């Protein structure tokens, strides 16, 4: 009975000590310890050998972190200083991860005001997934049209999007021809539509 009382007293004393130390540490630290830091984001070229083939696993983990990060900032300050870097690392670790490219095409140009970063990421997506996903080329075409005012390059990417088998192929082909006409490249537009008809 006496040993149990001593043990209980020691546990109670330790618990009180932990609370006192924790409260003291909380009051001693300033607000900077709670600031967001993305220092855990490694450079993909340096960490790939250490992942031993689990690049897609890390990219999925980082994707979850990215979605949570985006949601938290979208609901509060709408400032996304690490978003581009996070999407870039995800697509470098797993270049076949389509949702990251779609996110880059939709969110980065507008919310981060960085069409150049979105263009680079989407061009990587066209290289790896351009023949299976029409959206990536379509978003690139929109970026070239809206931000660079380059109708000819926009038409080129809309044309690439129309080559992917989907229910949107005919609409994308008409869109590409329209942009060739806007760029005053009538022969390219007519040739492309003739090719699509054949």
Image (cartoon, rainbow, N blue to C red):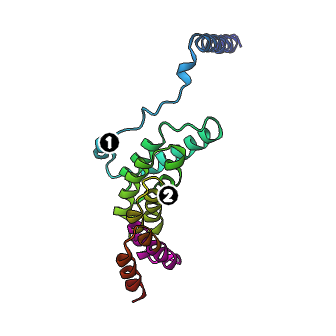
User: Disc 2 versus disc 1: distance between alpha carbons?
Assistant: 25 Å
Point 54% across, 45% down: residue: 111
Q: Earlier in the sequence, mark 2 or mark 1?
A: 1
Callout in the foreground (2, 1): 2
Principal SS element in the magenta part? Answer: helix
Q: Residue 77 appears at what percent x and percent y?
A: 61, 35
Residue 139 appears left or right of 14: left
46 sits left or right of 5 in the view: left
Give the mark count: 2
Q: Nearer the viewer, residue 160 or 165?
A: 160
Along the viewing direction, whichever of 85 and 4 lies nearer the viewer:
85
Q: Residue at x 39, y 85 (%)?
A: 194
In the rendered image, the quadrant that contains the N terminus is top right
From the viewer's perspective, is residue 115 above or below residue 195?
A: above
* Residue corresponding to mark 1: 47
Residue 87 circle label: none
Q: Which residues are magenta?
A: 156-177
Label 1 crowding class (10 Å Cα cut-off): few <14, some 14-19, many 20+?
few
Residue 144 found in image quarter: bottom left
Q: Is residue 159 above or below residue 44?
A: below
Residue underneath mark 2? 102
Give the image location of residue 128, x and y in percent.
35, 62
Question: Can residue 1 be seen?
Answer: yes
Q: Is residue 132 shown to the viewer in this render? A: no
Residue 160 located within the stretch drawn in magenta: yes
Residue 70 appears at what percent x and percent y?
56, 43
Residue 177 image offset from top left, x and y in percent: 44, 75
In the image, 87 versus 54, the foreground residue is 87
**What kind of element bears circle 1?**
helix
The answer to whether residue 45 is above or below residue 177 is above
- Residue 134: in magenta span: no
């Amino acid at each position: 009975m006496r040993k149990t009382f001593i043990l209980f007293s020691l546990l109670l004393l330790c618990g009180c000590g932990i609370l006192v130390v924790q409260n003291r540490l909380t009051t001693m630290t300033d607000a900077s310890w709670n600031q967001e830091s993305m220092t855990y984001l490694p450079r993909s070229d340096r960490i790939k050998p250490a992942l031993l083939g689990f690049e897609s696993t890390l990219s999925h983990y980082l994707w979850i972190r990215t979605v949570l990060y985006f949601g938290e900032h979208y609901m509060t300050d709408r400032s996304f200083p690490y978003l581009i870097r996070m999407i870039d690392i995800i697509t470098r670790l797993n270049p076949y991860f389509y949702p990251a490219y779609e996110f880059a095409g939709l969110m980065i140009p507008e919310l981060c005001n960085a069409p150049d970063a979105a263009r680079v990421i989407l061009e990587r997506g066209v290289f790896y997934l351009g023949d299976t996903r029409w959206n990536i080329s379509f978003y690139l075409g929109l970026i070239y049209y809206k931000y660079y005012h380059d109708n000819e390059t926009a038409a080129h990417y809309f044309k690439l999007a129309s080559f992917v088998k989907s229910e949107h192929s005919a609409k994308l082909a008409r869109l590409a021809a329209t942009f060739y006409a806007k760029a005053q490249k009538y022969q390219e537009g007519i040739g492309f539509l003739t090719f699509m008809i054949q």
